[in-house]
Amino acid sequence: LSSTSQFQQRNISYSKRWDLLPVSRDPREPEFKKEINTLTKERKDSFLSLTVGDPVIFGLVNEAVAPAINRAVEKKLFMYPEISGVQEEYRSAVSDFEKKSQGMDYDPANIVITAGVAGSMNVLHYTLLDPGDEVLTFSPLHYVGTSAYIRTLGANVIQVPALESNGWLPAPEDLRKAITPKTKLLMVNSPTNPQGTVYPDNILREIADIGAEFGIPIVSDEIYSLLTYDNVVAHPIGKFVKDNLVFTVSGVSKIFCAPGMRMGYICIKNSVEKFGKVADMVKRVGSMYGHASSGIPTPLMAAAAELYRSDLSSFRAILEKLKVRRALALKRLGEMSSLSLVRPMGALYFFPKITSKKWIDEYTFLLDLARSESVVFTPGATFGMGAEGHFRGVFMAEPSILSEAMDRLDRFLRKNAS
Ligand SMILES: Cc1ncc(COP(=O)(O)O)c(C=O)c1O
């Protein structure tokens, strides 16, 4: 029998895996955030922040969301999600939506319900990655900044450059060069965050072919799928994939302007029988992951199903507002000196490059700007390699606020023009 003293000698500790959790996305980030928080508190409402990709905080509310949630509440859908039957309705509504809006055919049985795309990514990483595995992602991309979870699994993110000089499009030969025997997953996101790039069909097809050639499953983040402009259409990479496994992830956060609902999904396209075991394990882990939190709130799942079955008129109304706001931001940015910009064709952001050499990096530029003009954007480096010297702004704000932010940025650039 162990003596009590033996127990007392033990150190209480957390799992070693969490030593791999990075403290921040960039070493400059904590100081930057601290000063911005101080300025925000001191200057209150006069301080403008165009940083967060949350439509609701900018007043973009999809009119169909509240009635759908209210109906679920009136129906008293408060039972545990897995016995409610609502899960089946959600899967089938997502399947119909994917068919109607993306032209993709997914069996509802191959749809995994998750808490947003963040939850989808966690299920996929948790199921597929072992220590030492490599996940390829194009860079810069939102995903690079949010990939801490991968590192805690002992896996590594390998960034394949998508150069600004090439309109932020990746070169398929660079992807080919980055593949090693350890490559386990290939991440694709179109339209992209932060650049708003929409990958054309030829690039999607080449990426799809390389994935199939090497037998590397593709994760396609389509959270901004319907949010495109100037008659550009974002096609799902799944359309071009033949003999491979594709996990399409999406949710209501951006398309239905409801990130607080935390509703997302993984659609598994499994065209080859040999991948059946992997696909089944993703479903099992998805179910386990759901049970870990007792699943997704039943009324919100019912409301999301209703949104996916809707005629999308409320989405189109939001898109019209976004078109006006994007046009305003692009016009103003185009007139500014010391900035260059690849036009975003999708998503919700602009991602200009600071061409002036006056600042050593975008952090010092943005802090100077915030101190002198009370407006803040997101530093580029948080989005990975190739994003240095850029910043991301959201064009979702109301036109009067967006104009004011643009006035401030313009004034600052003029003051500092050398
Ligand atoms: C490319 C991309 N994927 C996923 C997410 C997060 O989605 P969710 O709210 O569904 O977790 C974001 C949020 O900004 C994003 O930009």
Image (cartoon, rainbow, N blue to C red):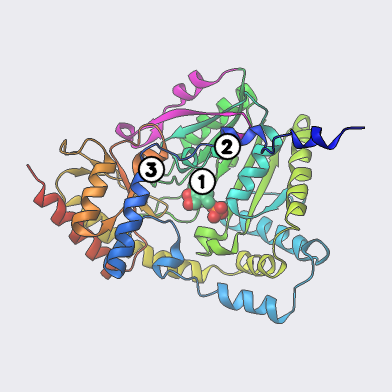
Mark 3 or mark 2, which is nearer the start of the sequence? 3
Whether residue 143 is situated above or below residue 264 in the rendered picture: above
> Pointers 2 and 1 in contact (CB under 8 A)?
yes
* Residue 30, image quadrant: top left
Report if residue 313 lies within the magenta region.
no
Q: Amino acid at mark 3?
A: Glu
Q: Secondary structure at mark 2?
A: helix
Q: Residue furthest right?
A: 1
Q: Position of residue 394 (x, y in %)?
A: 36, 56
Instruction: Return the residue at label 1.
Output: 235
Instruction: Return the residue at label 3.
Output: 29
Range covered by the magenta-colored residues: 152-180
Q: Is residue 330 left or right of residue 11?
A: left
Q: Residue at 26% x, 68% y: name it.
A: 46
Q: Position of residue 268 (x, y in %)?
A: 69, 43
Front residue (pair 6, 194): 6
Q: Residues within 10 Å of mark 2 (few under 14, many from 20)?
A: some
Q: Is mark 1 within 8 Å of ligand 1?
A: no
The disc at residue 240 is 2
